[in-house]
């Protein structure tokens, strides 16, 4: 049977008895179908690459901000070192006049500092013993250096704190609760969210591995993840957030206020 030279397309509007017929040549119909498929594929590729461009642009903006923060931090460190040198000289002179053998200790070398940072975090029994019955978060999820603090300034918004450490170091739950969320986030990478009492929740981002599951009950000091560099991150660290009724608050400030409030009870 020879192939048909024409295709008929029937359009039947709802409630209309007579359908609308459209007759076109076979090559024209096939061309329109091919163009439609090519347009759909083109749109998919366009939005796929466009999304990557937007992500990279956002990362570039974040890197510029972090670079500016590092420059300011480096400048402050240089001033601190100069002040320390002057302080050592002054202390040496005063000690000599007083006949006391005393010198200000030198800062440890970088190798010792980073070795200390690399030590895995441990649960301190004194901290656990002071936890309130409602399991409210206390302290920080890992021992290390806070490289970026909390900021609610719209121009430098940062809803948590960043704590540097070695990849694979244990991330500990700062309070008892239920694991509400785990998985990969485009910003926070491998992330864990824990729900606590009194409308509190904590978020732990940029992990290399997650050790808990959604719905799992955890105690304060439980190992919930391993420190990493996933998501939008320029160096290994954990991004730690404390939220009250889903609104980020400064973890350090909240801890101080909460402890004062507890002492007054």
Image (tube, grey):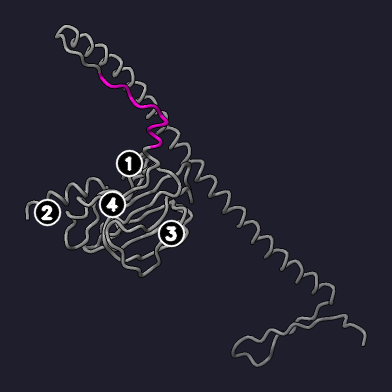
Give the crowd class for mark 1: few <14, some 14-19, many >=20 residues within 10 Å: some
Judge the density around disc 3: few (<14), some (14-19), many (≥20) Cα neighbours within 10 Å: some
What residue does disc 3 label? 210
Q: Disc 2 versus disc 4: distance between alpha carbons? A: 22 Å
Q: Identify the mark nearer the N-term, 1 or 4.
A: 4
What is the distance, in whole Å, between disc 3 and disc 4 at their CAs? 18 Å
Q: Nearer the viewer, mark 3 or mark 4?
A: 4
| Labels 2, 3: front one | 3
Among numbered discs 3 and 1, the one appearing first in the sequence: 1
**Viewer-side label of 1, 4:** 4
- Return the mark for residue 123: 4
Q: Which residue is mark 1?
A: 149
Disc 3 is placed on an element classified as: strand
Q: Position of residue 227 (x, y in %)?
A: 42, 50
Indicate the quadrant containing the N terminus: top left, top right, bottom left or bottom right: bottom right
Q: CA distance from mark 1 to mark 4?
A: 23 Å
Relative placement, left or right, of 158 versus 257 is right
From the viewer's side, name the closer residue of 222 and 135. 222
Quarter in which the C terminus is drawn: bottom left
Image quadrant where residue 70 sits: top left
Q: Residue at x 85, y 73 (%)?
A: 27
**Numbered label attached to residue 262:** 2
Residue at position x 47%, y 53% in the image: 208
Q: Secondary structure at mark 2?
A: helix
The reply to whether callout 2 and callout 3 are in contact (CB within 8 Å) is no
In three-dimensional space, the C-alpha distance between marks 3 and 1, rounded to whole angstroms, equals 24 Å
Where residue 130 sits, quadrant-wise, is bottom left
| Mark 4 surroundings within 10 Å by alpha-carbon count, few (fewer than 14), some (14 through 19), many (20 or more) | some
Q: Earlier in the sequence, mark 2 or mark 4?
A: 4
Q: Is residue 41 above or below residue 13?
A: above
Q: Residue furthest left?
A: 265
């Amino acid at each position: 049977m020879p192939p048909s030279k024409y295709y008929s397309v029937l359009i039947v509007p709802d409630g209309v008895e007579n359908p609308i017929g459209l007759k076109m040549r076979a090559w024209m119909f096939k061309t329109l179908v091919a163009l439609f498929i090519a347009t759909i594929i083109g749109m998919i590729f366009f939005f796929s690459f466009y999304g990557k461009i937007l992500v990279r642009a956002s990362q570039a903006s974040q890197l510029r901000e972090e670079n500016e923060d590092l420059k300011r931090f480096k400048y402050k460190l240089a001033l601190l070192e100069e002040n320390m040198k002057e302080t050592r000289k002054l202390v040496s002179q005063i000690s000599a006049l007083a006949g006391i053998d005393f010198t200000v200790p030198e800062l440890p070398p970088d190798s010792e500092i980073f070795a200390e940072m690399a030590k895995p975090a441990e649960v301190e029994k004194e901290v656990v013993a002071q936890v309130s019955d409602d399991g409210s978060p206390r302290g920080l999820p890992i021992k290390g250096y806070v490289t970026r603090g909390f900021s609610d300034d719209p121009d430098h918004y940062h809803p948590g704190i960043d704590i540097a450490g070695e990849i694979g170091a244990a991330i500990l739950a700062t309070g008892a609760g239920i694991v509400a969320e785990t998985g990969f986030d485009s910003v926070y990478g491998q992330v864990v969210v824990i729900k606590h009492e009194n409308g509190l929740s904590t978020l732990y981002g940029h992990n290399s591995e997650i050790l808990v599951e959604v719905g799992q009950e955890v105690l304060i000091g439980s190992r919930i993840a391993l420190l990493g560099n996933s998501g939008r991150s320029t160096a290994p660290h954990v991004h730690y957030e404390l939220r009250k009724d889903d609104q980020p608050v400064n973890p350090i400030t909240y801890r101080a206020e909460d402890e004062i409030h507890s002492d007054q009870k």
